[in-house]
Image: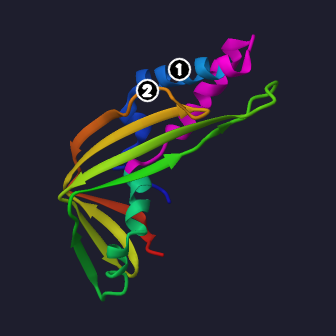
Amino acid sequence: MSPGNDSLWLDSVLGPESSDALAAQLAKAGAKDNSLSAMSLFEGAVANAVKSCLHVDLLALLAEGWRTAQEIHAAKTAPGVTVLKLANHQIKREIKPVLKIDGIDKPLEASVVVAGHFKGIELSIANGAIVSVGSGHCDITLEFDLAGEALQDPTTLKDWQLPGEHRFDPPLPIP
């Protein structure tokens, strides 16, 4: 899936200071587990892995939850374009990067949970796929952990009105 120009990138929403702070926090937690002496090398590897993991389109990531919802499947075979008005709902998606670093026997397992709390949005469905999400309200929260330990409480990243229309390019097929 290649996000369009109006993509809502997670790393952009976080901003460089928050991404760097998260990477440093993960590196310190990982260093405790692995008793690393080359901390600066480790921090750099973790920072690169975190930045790579966070470069994801938020709406495309969360839309995976819509693709699998039973209510959406009913509109899959409808002729033409079907617009569904969705009730308030939440979708959670988890990203699980595994950090493998030279010189460390055991890879570090991290988890990033992204939750979208949606109010008053519309989905457009055509030809068996979600083609766009319409205006509405969305709060995005994040949770991070390393090796099963939470690094912080869930954080509200952004509270915003979604764009008038966010088109998925290509459309997201409904299974």
Q: Which residue lies under the disc numbered 2?
A: 152
The local secondary structure at tag 1 comes to: helix
In the rendered image, the residue lying farthest to the top is: 37
Q: Which residue lies under the disc numbered 1?
A: 25
Do we see residue 85 in this rendering? yes
134 sits to left or right of 6: left
Image position of 154 with respect to 83: above or below: above
| Label 1 crowd bin: few (<14), some (14–19), many (20+), radius 10 Å | some
Image position of 172 with respect to 109: above or below: below
Which residue: 22% across, 65% down?
86
Visual colour scheme: rainbow
Residue 60 picture location, percent across and down: 42, 55
Q: Which residues are magenta?
A: 32-58
Q: Exactly how many numbered labels are in the figure?
A: 2
Residue 147 picture location, percent across and down: 62, 33
Question: Mark 2 belongs to which amino acid?
Answer: Gln
Q: Which dot, 1 or 2, sits closer to the camera? A: 2
Give residue 100's quadrant in the image: top right
Residue 34 picture location, percent across and down: 73, 21
Question: Are circles 1 and 2 on residues that touch, CB within 8 Å?
Answer: yes
| Label 2 crowd bin: few (<14), some (14–19), many (20+), radius 10 Å | few
In the image, 118 versus 82, the foreground residue is 118
Residue 20 picture location, percent across and down: 49, 22
The local secondary structure at tag 2 comes to: loop
In the rendered image, the residue lying farthest to the front is: 149
Question: Mark 1 belongs to which amino acid?
Answer: Gln
Do we see residue 4 in this rendering? no
114 sits to left or right of 135: right
Image position of 105 with respect to 171: above or below: above
What separation in Å lies between label 1 and label 2 (alpha carbons)?
10 Å
In the image, 94 versus 126, the foreground residue is 94
